[in-house]
Each structure stands twice: as structure tokens, then as C-alpha cells.
Image (cartoon, grey):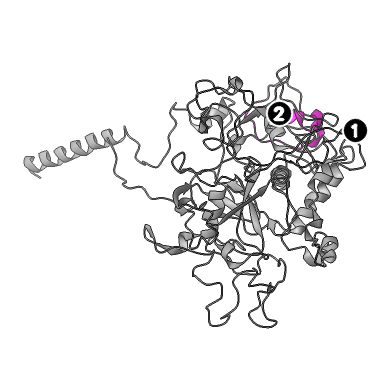
Amino acid sequence: MNFKNLYSITKILLTLLVMASLVSCHNRNPRKIVSLTGWSSKDKKTAGFSEAGDYRGQQAPPGMVLIEGGSFTMGHVQDDVMFDWNTTPIKQQVRSFYMDETEVTNAEYLFYLDWMEKVYPPSDVNYENIYLSAVPDTLVWRDVLGFNELLTENYLRHPGYADYPVIGVSWIQANQYCHWRTNRVNEKILMDKGVLKNIYNLEDIEVSGENNFDTDAYLNNPNQVFGGNQDIYKKGLTDNVKRKKDDPKPARGEFTGRQVKISDGILSAKFRLPTEVEWEYAAKAIVENREYNNTRGRKKYAWDGKYTRNKSKKYRGDQLANFKQGKGDYSGVPGWSNDGADITIQVKSYEPNAFGLYDMSGNVAEWVADVYRPIVDNDANDFNYFRGNIFTKKMIDAEGNVVITDNVSVEYDTLDNGKLVAKSLPGSVKYIPITKRDAYMRDNYEKSYNVDAKDGDLKSTKFYAKDEEELETKPRMYNSPIKPREIGESGLIMQQYDTEKRNTLISDKSRVYKGGSWKDREYWLDPSQRRYLPEYMATNYIGFRCVTDRIGPMTYKRRLPTTTKIRY
């Protein structure tokens, strides 16, 4: 080896050494998230700080499927024979969420009723109206010129209808079910994790009244649940706090570790009704019409195609949904062209749509969360649109503690139809509307009540420059009926009707429901069609299903980096 070759090799080695030193100053893996403080997970644990742990992503809740979010055209209908002009096509972005495969069935709702009756027994004067407020209106089957008494007596509770969608449920009742479901799902998660004992099998503890599990109360302060009784807890998560030599050993069966927090990613997100945008997006399932980054054509139903009959060779001519086919024709000719039902039908009787959702067209229409307005204001918001926000905060007492509803402080609202509903159930956190002080100097909202924002509020009238305190009566954009609220001798609101002449039923209590039902003609099967009904009313053709938010990435699919080059 001559001197010239040795010089070349030395030069190459020095170059590689310099490059290695430069690269070592940077993150070799651009996808790896590093600590901004230099504290590793081990350092945090050693110092006694809690670590997020091994979070592997959100799991689909029981009975739900992931609806991957995206952009679509809302209100894109094929027909508008009603000339409502309330389905103007608008572009909307929808976030990912989970949705029930089917509507809530009678069997699932009966579990809810059984739980309510056990925990809030109607025989107790403190809870006498709580259970009744949850019971569906079975009399919706009655017709002055029809014989349907069998359905009023059997549809809800008979095992023959167990897997049929629950009906006779108002929008308010559907919301209450969603809240209850959140608590039961998280209660089961904590019991399965061993944090919470099986409270229903404990001899010294009775699940009754304020002694029940509430997710918000637990996350706020686990010591407030069950009146502070620590016997309901079994074993907590690792708290990374080292026990000192002089500290006594915990007694056998004593709770050790720490309680679950949101940052652990263990508890489920809250269940709720879908927004109108979410429901329509999920029903249309335009994902099956996608070609690369475009959507080809438009969909009239939840399935692909412009007809209601099956076009496959094996089932050619069969109906694809349960709906009213004509005057006096709810099921078709016996043995042929039959949709299989004269009223509702067992869930999953028809094929699902491209998202894996059943009966998004037909069987029963479904409640959504939105307050109805003829126009969806795309100019105001084109991202996850929703009308109905009332911003609240937790009620705090004089001592600075969050207020939990107890057995003797249950307050009720009297609905326009005279029924009573509890504002908050015993054992749950009390919420109150935010104040102007809470919204001071915010540019995204300025008050609690936003149901009529830009369409019915003061700013949308000719008095837009005035403050509400300056006016004796607030102007009304929609001249809907006003229920007289006079208190009778019984202490309840008297049953009276509005005697004034009105020209609309649209109000802040009008809620949207979507989809066709067994009682509707083909026109209403289009997911873009929209109707409304007061939130306290129920029918024999409206049911509901729940959703919950997708937390983290939009989809399970891992997005590849655009480049793997080191950026300097």
C-alpha cells in the first residue's frame, strides 16, 4: 500500500466520522417522538411522576364500528317533492367517530329500565318520577281507527320483539340513555381492570340512589363516589411512589396504587346521539363510490344504486329495506316482493351499508342531536357542524367542591306535555350554564345558550345592536306555539293549549330526525331528507342509535411519512 492510497483511505474515514457526528445531533427516526425535557419514562417513574403507560390506541366500543371521517356534500337529495327547501347542498367535513351497528333494541333498553327501577325504585318518594321518565310511551301504537292494542301491551317487553328497535322514545329519553350507557360501560371497564369491585355483589354496599357509579363524579374525585366509601375499590394502577421504610404496610384488601385518570386512556369517551351531519355521512357511506380522491356520482339510499329492490341473481326483486310500499301496502304481496315486516323488523334483517351499519334506510327513523332550522349555515361553520350547543360548567359549592346530586335534592323539569324529568340524577355531577364572565374576551363564543345562534337569536333580528337586558321581551323569529305555564292546585303545570294564531312549529325544542321508517314511503329513505319533532314527543316510527368520538388518528391505517430523509 503506497502513501497515496493511505491518504485516500484516511480522507474517506474522516469524512464518514464527520457525517456520523452531524447525524448524531439529530433524530435518526423522524417518526419517533422524543422528550422535550430530556426526561425519559424511566426518569419520570424514578422521581414518582405518573407516565401515560403503554397506550395502544382506542378500541371500538361494544356493538360499534368506526366511521372514518372525511369531506362530503350534505343535503344532496335526488327529489324534493315537498318543496321544503331545507336540503340545500353544502360541503362539510366530518370527524371520525364510532357508531352503533344497529338501532338500540328493546332488549338493550329493557336492561336500562331494569337498572333504573333497581337503583331508583318508584316506591321511594325521592325517586318516584325518575323511573317513569325513562319508560317509553307504548301508547304510540294506538290509532282511533285501528286495532293495535296487542302492540301497546307487548312490543316493548315481549321476547318476540326483543331484537326489534325500541320506539316510543322521545329525544330527551334517548339522551338520558346515552348518559346512562357511558356510566355502565366505564363501570364495567374499571371492574374488568380490577380497580372497582363488582359493586352489585357486595354484601355491605347497596347500589341505590346516590350510591351508584358516575363517570364525571369519578374523574372529578373518586372519593365522592358512593359517599366516599373506599370499600368499593379493589386495586389501583401503579403510582410510582416509593414507600418509605417507616411507612406501615397496607392492610390486606386495602386499596393501593392510584385511581384511573383520563390521561391513562382506559375509560371510554361519552356516548351521545349523532349530529345530523354525522348521521347523514354515515348513512350515505360514500366510501364505496370513491375512485382515488374523488366520489363518482351521488347516492340516493344507504346502499349503492337508485332502486329499492335487490339486483343480485339470487335475491332479485327482494326489497332492500323495510318501508311502506304504497297505499295500504306495508309488506308487499305474500310470498313475493315482501320486505318481511308489516311494522318494524328485527335488526340486521337486511344487508349493512359500506360502513357496516344496518337499517340506515328503513325500519325506523332515528333521532339526531341537532335543533332544527330550515337552513344549515355552511358559511358559519363547515367543520363538524352542529346546532344545539349550551355550554355549561360544574357547579361549585361555597367550600370549592363540585356539587353531587344527593337523594333529597333531585330537581325536576316539567315538559310541555306535562311529564316530569329529573335535571340530574342522584350520584351525578350538577352542571350550570356558563356566565358572561366565563366567556369574557373569547372570540369563539360569548354566552352559554347558542341553540338559536345566527337564526333566531337577538343578533339575527332588527334589534341586533341592542343587549337582551335592554328589551322587555325578546323578539321571536319563529312564531311557534308557546305553552301556558300556569301552576295548578296540585303544584304542577296546568294542561292548557296555546290559543294564539301561529304559523310554524319550528322552535328551539324542535329536534331533527333522519331516515325513513316502516311507516314512510320510499321518498324518505334518502339519508339527506330531514324532518323535525318536539324533543319531548315520541312516535311509533322513531328510534335511535348512539355514537362516541374517535380519539387520536382518524383511522386505524398508519400513514406513511412523505420522506424518511433527515431534516437539518
Q: CA distance from mark 1 to mark 2?
A: 42 Å
Amino acid carrying label 2: it is Asn
Q: In the visual, does 529 lie left or right of 518?
A: left
The reply to whether residue 97 is in sight is no
Residue linked to disc 1: 489
Label annotation for residue 22? none
Q: Which residues are magenta?
A: 222-242
Could you tell me which secondary element the residue under label 2 belongs to? Answer: loop
The reply to whether residue 92 is in sight is yes
Pick the residue in front: 383 or 142: 142
Residue at image position (64%, 72%) is 326
**Closer to viewer: mark 1 or mark 2:** 1
User: Residue 549, located in which quarter of the rendered image?
Assistant: top right
Residue 524 vertical position relative to residue 171 in the rendered view, above or below: below
> Where's residue 302, x and y in %?
54, 63
Residue linked to disc 2: 221
The number of callouts visible is 2
Dot 1 surroundings within 10 Å: few (below 14), some, or many (20 or more)?
A: few
